[in-house]
Amino acid sequence: MDLFNAIAQTLDSTIRLSVPLLLACLAGLYSERAGIFDIGLEGKMLVGAFAGAAAASVFHSAYLGLGMAILISVAFALIHGFASITHRGNQIVSGVAINFIAAGSTIILGQAWFQQGGRTPALAPAERFEAIIWPGADAVRGVPILGPIYSELISGHSVLVYLAFLMVPFTWWVLFRTRFGLRLRAVGENPAAVDTAGISVAWLRYRALICTGVLTGVAGAYLSMVQNGGFVKDMTAGKGYIALAALIFAKWKPVNAMFACLLFGFLDALAIRLQGTPLPLIGRVPVQFMQALPYVLTVILLAGFIGKAIPPRAGGVPYVKER
Amino acid sequence: MAQAAIELIGINKSFGAVRANRDINLEIARGTIHGIVGENGAGKSTLMSILYGFYQADSGEIHVGGQPASIKTPNDAIALGIGMVHQHFMLVDNFSVLENVILGAESDALLKKSIAKARSELERLEREYGLEVDPDAIIEELPVGLQQRVEILKALYRGAEILILDEPTGVLTPAEADHLFRILKQLKEQGKTVVLITHKLREIMAITDTVSVMRQGTMVATRETKKTTVGELAELMVGRRVLLRVEKGEAEAGGIKLAVKNLTVKDSRGVTVVDDVSFDLRAGEIVGIAGVAGNGQSELLEAISGIRHAVSGSVMLDGKPIDLTGAADPGELRERGLAHVPEDRHHVGLVLAFEENENSILGYHDDERYLKGPFLNIDAIRDDAKDKITKYDIRPADCRLRTANFSGGNQQKIVLAREMEQDPGVLIVGQPTRGVDVGAIEFIHKRLIAMRDQGKAVLVVSVELDEIRSLSDRILVMFAGRIVGERGPEATEGELGLLMAGVEHQEAAE
Amino acid sequence: MSTPYAKLPGWADYGLIPVINLFVAFVVAGFVVMLVGENPLRAAAILVEGAFGRGQGIAFTLYYATTFIFSGLSVAVAVHCGLFNIGGEGQGYIAGLGIGVVCLAFDSVLPWWLTFPLAIIAAAAMGALWALIPAYLQAKRGSHIVITTIMFNFIAASVMVYMLVDVLKPAGSMAPQTRNFLEGGQLPKLNWIIELFGAKIRSAPLNVTFLLALVMAFLVWLLIWRTKLGYEMRTYGHSPKAARYAGISETRIIIIAMLISGALAGMMALNPVMGDQHNVALDFVSGAGFVGIAVALMGRSHPVGIVLAAILFGMLYQGGAELAFEMPAISRDMIVIIQGLVILFAGALEHMFRPHIQALFASISPRTVGIEAVKGKGA
């Protein structure tokens, strides 16, 4: 039973660790499917985390915090749009810039406003998104196998966790079942086709970036208001880049994205769990190996050794009317 | 008399200093097929893009169905019943036919409803116009001819009454082209107006009711198709340019320098663009390849110079084969005495951001004269560049000036000077005087003839018929990827024009 | 295609535009300072005073600049070949390993002037190696070099943590770092140069690596503008089609450019490792690889511009430290914002001001900007 509990706990932390990845990954999906590379996911998550925690602690409301996280994150997404859509700048360079501005400004403003070394004040329970205990979760805890699955894995997460997983079918639905999704995918493949069909390429891409901003905002809010009881500097710690790797790994598909994020989350959970514990047959696996695995897998995928990751064809190229 | 479907009045459009359209007037009657012919760069596509709202005219008026119309975006054009089939299809390759058809014209925010409605409408259109295509097929899996049908269906689905087709047969096989013409005739019978842009005169004669000819941005004539001939149209298209005939003596052709045998090249779409071409190029002669742009000349040049893959055939340089797998080292070919002046000097022949002297060694940067060990011998390079500047009268005479700041003619001289001064055995030149002013044209022509007189083998590809006639000792005419005839320099413009238009050999001889 | 050729006179291109970009970046940063409730002008004064006011400050400024010269050159070399090497951080980090091994092996037997050349080679080799795989994957398999180099940054971080915690950490020590190098692994300081001018320096880490950085800047200039290889790199960087026409192998040039770029990124590790800390510690690169992006953009990928931009950023780092002391509300992270803003305005938004400046020049004197029209292709 010990082993089973260990597995259940590992899977539970897999879910917790996957959620920010999943939200950021789906965020990246919207912009990259529309033909805008976005390595600024990291920065947008970070400003979202900061704005969320800061607003929640000032206004004593988790939902106001979430709203502010989304608002600020969208604002940063629009800066990316201004540079890369309106001024046809290099999308990579713009993303890098956003990550730096985010990293610096969250610390400076955090210190100036709260004087706690770049942290925001610890959030009170009402200022956070609390776990939702599903009916009967405690009652069935004792039931073997199904009990822990229900009470640990399914029940007992915050609303943002459920939201994140609901975003997967929702994103799939938007992308493949709505007019907006059709156009969004089209503009990432062949913007000229969209332009000649009488649709504004720029406005469409801006809308895609707004979707990205909303989701990175939620991802940030999750970090500072669910996983942690407040903002800590650099708390995204590369998660935006892992999300980017997951997006490539998922070949830009929503359901794949969920599995990729769960895989990367699982590797992370396993690394934490196995710290120092030797595995049978293999012996002690360095934690760092597990931590590097998502990146190594992504590079192998990019090299075309496991399938081929074909990005949206118009990705990274500013749209210019050709004559 | 049919009412005008479209009337263009005084349309002007410039791109930077290039005047793509000058004071264009045009009237197209409803329910007719109207052809617009002209060489590449004559301004046909620009004019139609203005009509479709893709560009804004600098000045002028557009009337649609007798009413003045303001067309600022493709949306406006679509609303006025104008549809366009672009030369490069505006399709999303990994979408289905249905998805492409409804893109931008979805009836509902949810796809399911839009698609259901589109499906029945599409089936009706397909039946009505003989445009059968599987609505669920993915575009990239369809042959080019069917992709084009999707483009036409897209326009019809949006209720197009006026359909513009830009070079629609460029990518089609003859059978596919015939099918397209049948469709266009059917559209006409249903009361639609068709505007056909092409440079292929035979198509114009076969299918249009009226035809307009454009040349260098102006509309030079409009004719009833029945009352004109291919010869007249060819002449109008090419124009009678005032060109000084360069004095030249008889050629003293020597041994074979370059032997091309059964060369076949396909483009990235798998369409055969050079079809079983064979010819010899001898020392001491200039062979000109004439033809309307887009008939495989560019690809032929690239294959010979080793930068494009050829599917079959051989090219022998001084009796030794050239690697045609596309992996040839152009540097090695240069060493073997093959110099190449590419057609596209802006992106291929020059690096515009470089100083003039840096471009004067492009491709020859491996040459010991320009190097000191691993280092560039800057003094030698600049001295050499200055020599060429003097010799070729390149202006301004500043070898440190950025290449982008030279005029077109002087840029071309930079390329020519570089390639000619290497003293190659074989010189192949694409469009020697495109975008070059008259003074420079004469200079360049004299240089090419001087090369010939030194016993070099020169191959010139040009869409300027006069240039070909003035320079060549032998003229090969290319049409649809094939060499359709060989003539001497005494051949008349009309005779060559007919060959260029793809009119059969025998007919031309009559 | 649509990218306008730089048609401005050289001084405007290399001088005026960077200054405008920098100015705008500082104005925006000034707003952040105001948001924090401080006076931006006073902040600027403290910053400059802190960086250049005393010999101590100057030495620190130049110490930081040393690292940034390397990372800026690294980015610039790749840019000249049309590549964006965002992996300088990882390449520099992993190079620390090479330096560490050389120093740990020889610091007790060789004098610094023999260890140093070996360490330079080791650093360059490790950095180049770390750039090789992304370069190969880009050249041969078309994997986007930006993504692979980012991934390699993280892989490098994991490798280094593992090496420092599990392999190189001396037994009994708690800190995840190598033992301190002996004298043979410590580079001499250069503070006496500044003291020649009468300044007093207590202790500052400015060391001989600074001279190496200047030498490398010169060598990069030589490479890019005076060698055949540099010529080929620039040709490919401006126009892959022209490179193909000129017989330049795409695979070869991409790999060579990335090897050089990686080697330069690797060398930046010499400065903190051998010049200051005398050990290899966790996270010793601390973002310097990314600063290189800002430095290269600011310096317009020219070694002279890079040295100046590196000194500017060195000034920001050193002055920023003083600023944090004087104005507790402003920490050194202010520099990260400025860095981001510089990247934004000099990089991503470079097309925002340029057309206006070009138009301005054109209206004043059409001759200076060249009037060659951009030819339309087909009609």
Image (cartoon, coloured by chain):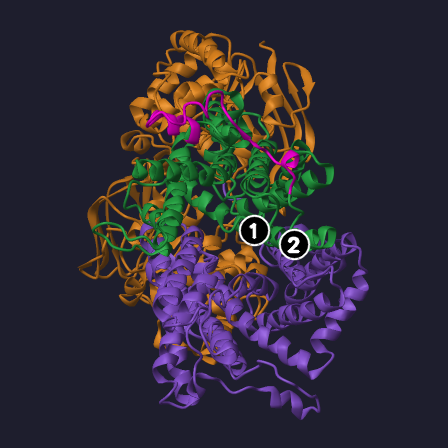
Chain colours: A green, B orange, C purple
- Which quarter of the figure has residue A269? top left
Which amino acid type is marked by label 2?
Answer: Gly
Tag in front: 1 or 2: 2
Residue bounds of the magenta highlight = A123-152
Residue drawn where x is 55% and y is 42% of the image: A223
Q: Can you say whether B121 is above or below C368 in the image?
A: above
- Whole-percent x and y of residue B119? 42, 11
- Residue position marked by numbered label 1 in the rendering: C3
Tally of marks: 2
- What chain letter is assigned to the residue under label 1? C
Residue identifier under label 2? A118
Image location (x, y in percent) of residue C31: 76, 54
In the image, residue C162 lies at what x, y percent? 37, 62
Which residue is depicted at the point 46% across and 27% down?
A155
Instruction: Locate residue B441 relative to residue B370 in the image: left or right.
Output: right
Q: CA distance from mark 1 to mark 2?
A: 41 Å
Regarding mark 1 in the picture, which secondary structure is present there?
A: loop
